[in-house]
Amino acid sequence: MELSGKSPASSDHNTSKKTVASSATAKSTGKSTASSAIVVKPNGKAVASSANPMEPNAATDLSSLPSEQVMFFREVSLGPREAELMFRMIHFWDARNPNTKTLIGREMLLIDEEGTVIQGFIPASRVERYELIAGSVYKLINFFGSRSKDQFRVADHSATVSFSWNSSLYVLENPPVQIPEDRFRFHTYEEFKANCDSRADLYDYVGHMKLVNGQTLTDHIVLDEADIAEKRHLCVHIQTHDGPVMKMYLWDKAASDFCQKFKSFGGIPSVLLVTTVNPKHIGGTLALTSMSSSRVFMDADVQPSKDYLEWLVSNSEIANRVSAEVVTKPEAVTLEELFSYIKNETSKVAWFECTATIDDVIQGSAWYYISCGGCNSKAVKGPTSLVCNNKKCDKREVTGVPQYLTKISVYDKSEQAVFVILGDAGKELTGKHAAELVANYFESNAGVGVDHCVPVPDALLETIRQTRKFIMKVSDHNLTGKTQTITVTKIIPACAPLPSVSDGISKTAGDDCGPSGGVGGDASDRARKAAEYLESDEAKRSKSG
C-alpha cells in the first residue's frame, strides 16, 4: 500500500510502517464518507463543550470567538499552549487502571487537515465536560502539550494534546477545510514479529480470515455470542496475501463489534482490518491481540480493506494455498515447555502438540463415563431413566453412551505428566470405541449388574510403552492451578517407543517421528464436550478438597 497524505514533522518518530490516509469532505447533508462511524447534531448549531462548569454545552457563534494562533499538529510541542487546533475526531476510548479498572481518562485519536495524526487525552476529572462524537470535526482552544507515553502509542507524534483547565472545544458541522477521515499504520508479519512482546507502538493489521473460532468461512458458520461474551474474546486465524498465518484475539468491545459486523453482512465477509493491535507470543507462536483503542472493519468498510478485498478476489488461488488443516496445526512442545507455558501468568487457553511415551494407564477410578447420546454431556440418573446434565440440551430422557475418560501417565525426554484421554481420542489410541469395549465386557460377564464398574480393558493396557503424538488443550483450570491433568483431544498414530531408563524419564527423543496432526475440524465435538465435563468435575473436586 502506498504512503500518502503524510506531513513532515520534526516531532514525529521515524518508523518503517506503511501509512494510508483516507480523505473525504463532509457532504451537505451533514454526513460524511468517514472510515469510522460519524454522527452530527441534527439542529445545525455548533455545540460548545466549555471548561466553564456553569455553561458546559452552550450554543456558540464561532464567528464571535477571539482569533487565536492556528496551529497544525506538526507544530505541537511540549508545554502549555494558548493556540487553536482544528481536527477530526477519528476515535476515542476510555483508559482505565488494568488492576482496579478506575477511569484514568479518555484517550483520542485526532487528525488535522495536513493528515498528521496525534493522540489526545482528557483527564478523568474533565471527561464529563466534553461530549465527543467520532468522525466529527472540532476546534480546540488552549491545551497542554504533554509527552507521549513510551508504551502502546497509537500515533507517531512525540507529544499528546491534553485538555487543560482553560480548554474550550467546539464542534464544526461545516468545516472550512477538508480534513481526512482516517489514517492507518500497517505492519507486515515480519514487522509484527520483530516487535513481539515489546509493548511498543500499536500498529494496524489488514488481511483475510481463514477461521473464526475454529470454524471455516462457510454459509453455515455460527457465532455463539453468549459464549463469546462469557469468555470475553474470540480467535480469528488471519493471513496477509500469501504470508504466514497468525491468530488474532479480539477482546471485549472488539469481539462484540466483530460479531455485529459479521452478522450484518448479507454474505460471509472475507477481509478483516483491526487497528492498534499488540503482537505477543501466545502458545509459543506470534499472535495479535486487540486493545481498548482497537477498531474493527471488514471488506469494503474503509478504503484499505476495500483495496485488499479487490486483491483477494483477483488472487484467490494465492490466498487459498494454506489449508485449514495447516492453519490449525498446534505448536510442537516438550512436556517441560508445556509446564513452563502453564506457569506463565500471561498465558491463555491454547492447543499444543507433544510427542510422549505412555508409561501406565492409571487405575482406581472409572476409565469412561456415560454421556448423553445427543450432546455428549454427562448423563445422570433420573427418577425413571437417564437425564442429560446439560441444561441447553433439548433431550431430557436419553440413551446413555459410554465415552472415554481415561487417565494415563506419560513421559518424554524432559518431564513426566498425566494426560486424560477424552471421547474419540480414546478410539484413536485403542482403535475401538469405549461403548464397544464396555459392551464386550458385559457380554462376557453376564452375571454382573449394570452399575458394575468395568475394569480397564486390555485394549488400553496394550498401549503402555507406545509413543504417540498428542494434541493437548491447556484449559483455564490448568492456568489457574485447579488441575495439573492435561486434556488430550486428538492422538496421532504410534511411533517407535522412547527408551525407558531407571528414573522413568527418557534420555533420547522421538520428536521427529510420525505425521503432524491438527486441531479444529478434526477434533470432535464429543471430545470437546467431554473436556468441558472433566474441567467442571475437576473444579468441583478441588473446591471440596
Image: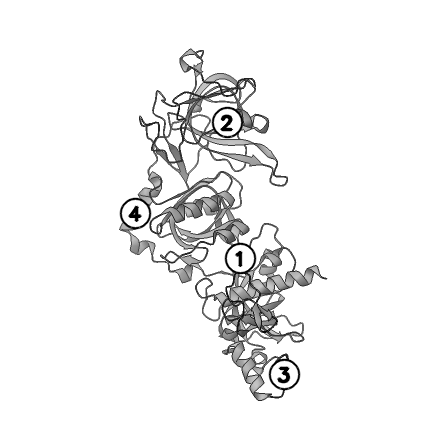
Disc on the earlier residue, 1 or 4: 4
Q: Position of residue 150 (x, y in %)?
A: 54, 34
Report if the CB atoms under discs 1 and 4 are less than 8 Å apart.
no
The local crowd at label 2, few if under 14, some if 14 to 19, many if 20 or more residues have their Cα within 10 Å, is many
Mark 2 or 1, closer to the camera: 1
- Residue type at mark 2 is Ala
Determine whether the residue tagged by mark 2 lies in a helix, strand or loop: strand
Q: Which residue is mark 4?
A: 311
Residue 116 - label:
none
Residue 350 - label:
1
- Toward the right, the furthest residue is 545
Disc on the earlier residue, 3 or 1: 1
Report if the CB atoms under discs 4 and 3 are less than 8 Å apart.
no
Quadrant in the rendering for residue 405: bottom right
Mark 4 or 3, closer to the camera: 3
Left or right: 335 with respect to 69? right
Instruction: Name the quarter where the C terminus is drawn.
Output: bottom right
Residue 159 - label:
2
Determine whether the residue tagged by mark 1 lies in a helix, strand or loop: strand
Mark-to-mark CA distance, 4 and 2: 37 Å
Q: Is residue 91 above or below residue 361?
A: above
Mark-to-mark CA distance, 3 and 1: 41 Å
